[in-house]
Amino acid sequence: MAINNKLPLLLLLSVVILFLSRTVLSDTDEEDVLFTGINSYRTSQNLTTLNKNKNAECLADELADQFKNKPCTNETGSATVPGTEPQFSDYPNILAKCHLNVSDTRDGSIMPACVPRLESSLVLTNFTKSQYSMSLNDSKFTGMGIGKEDDWIVVVLTTNTPEGNYSPATKQDSNGFTFSVGLFNYLLAFMLSFCFFLC
Ligand SMILES: *[C@@H]1O[C@H](CO)[C@@H](O)[C@H](O)[C@H]1NC(C)=O
Ligand SMILES: *[C@@H]1O[C@H](CO)[C@@H](O)[C@H](O)[C@H]1NC(C)=O
Ligand SMILES: *[C@@H]1O[C@H](CO)[C@@H](O)[C@H](O)[C@H]1NC(C)=O
Ligand SMILES: *[C@@H]1O[C@H](CO)[C@@H](O)[C@H](O)[C@H]1NC(C)=O
Ligand SMILES: *[C@@H]1O[C@H](CO)[C@@H](O)[C@H](O)[C@H]1NC(C)=O
């Protein structure tokens, strides 16, 4: 009897928790939109499209994390005056986190942009209609990685030369991480439901 009374609540709770964990996890939207947008731009310039580069994506994530507390102004992000880019004293450590070093990233290009709430049309034009278009328009680039944090989104371009391919690629699989976070949420939902069932 007691169990029957709780069953609908139990189901509802499970659904809510699953829904919440999915919403929290699906944080790649703006990145996917920008990825597609940049490749459309490349196509419109008669250039090859860029492939996803995992290490570049890792670096873009780390850099977005460094930028996230900096305010958006008319002199940051894609509007930065060349030569005044922020320098990170721990840059070699940031690279190392992504299994990279200065010599295999030298030819790459790092492009941070700040757009309030990452409004997608503004995000794309911040890359295609700013100083960054010169790099996006360059046939030497073959890959990219995108990371975001709050109002900041960072694109890292890679080449297929040893100085820019970002690939002392070790077997660090970021999908594995996402999977385990996902799994954890499902386990949590399961355990909470189970607890309700017993209590
Ligand atoms: C791309 O190629 C097409 C056909 O060859 C040409 O008409 C067009 O002007 C080219 N666009 C650019 C941006 O070079
Ligand atoms: C940025 O904005 C400030 C004040 O709003 C202005 O004084 C400055 O000239 C602007 N800088 C650029 C590069 O537009
Ligand atoms: C870039 O985004 C900012 C918002 O932070 C916007 O004011 C600016 O016009 C955008 N620049 C371009 C070139 O789209
Ligand atoms: C891109 O490069 C092509 C050829 O190098 C050039 O014709 C075109 O004007 C460039 N576009 C931009 C937006 O820089
Ligand atoms: C960077 O990594 C490459 C490949 O792993 C290695 O050959 C090179 O010696 C490293 N360079 C530095 C400066 O650590």
Image (cartoon, rainbow, N blue to C red):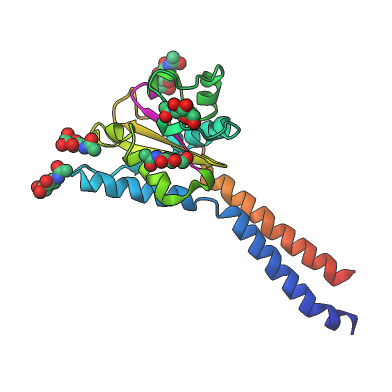
* Occupied quadrant, residue 130: top left
Q: Residue at x 50, y 50 (%)?
A: 28
Q: Residue at x 33, y 31 (%)?
A: 131
Q: Residue at x 34, y 49 (%)?
A: 37
Q: Above or below — where is 143 with respect to 66? A: below
Image quadrant holding the C terminus, namely bottom right
Left or right of 122, for residue 39: left
Asked whether 173 falls inside the magenta stretch, the response is: no
Left or right of 191, for residue 46: left
Q: Above or below — where is 189 with respect to 38? A: below
On the image, the x and y values in percent for residue 23 come to: 60, 58
On the image, the x and y values in percent for residue 112 come to: 45, 33
Q: Which one is in front, 29 or 25?
A: 29
Residue 199 shows up from this direction: yes
Left or right of 161, for residue 93: right
* Occupied quadrant, residue 185: bottom right
- Ligand 3 lies in which image quarter? top left
Q: Which one is in front, 181 or 152?
A: 152
Left or right of 15, for residue 199: right
Q: How many marks?
A: 0
Residue range in magenta is 105-115
On the image, the x and y values in percent for residue 42 come to: 26, 44
Image quadrant holding the N terminus, namely bottom right
Residue 168 shows up from this direction: no
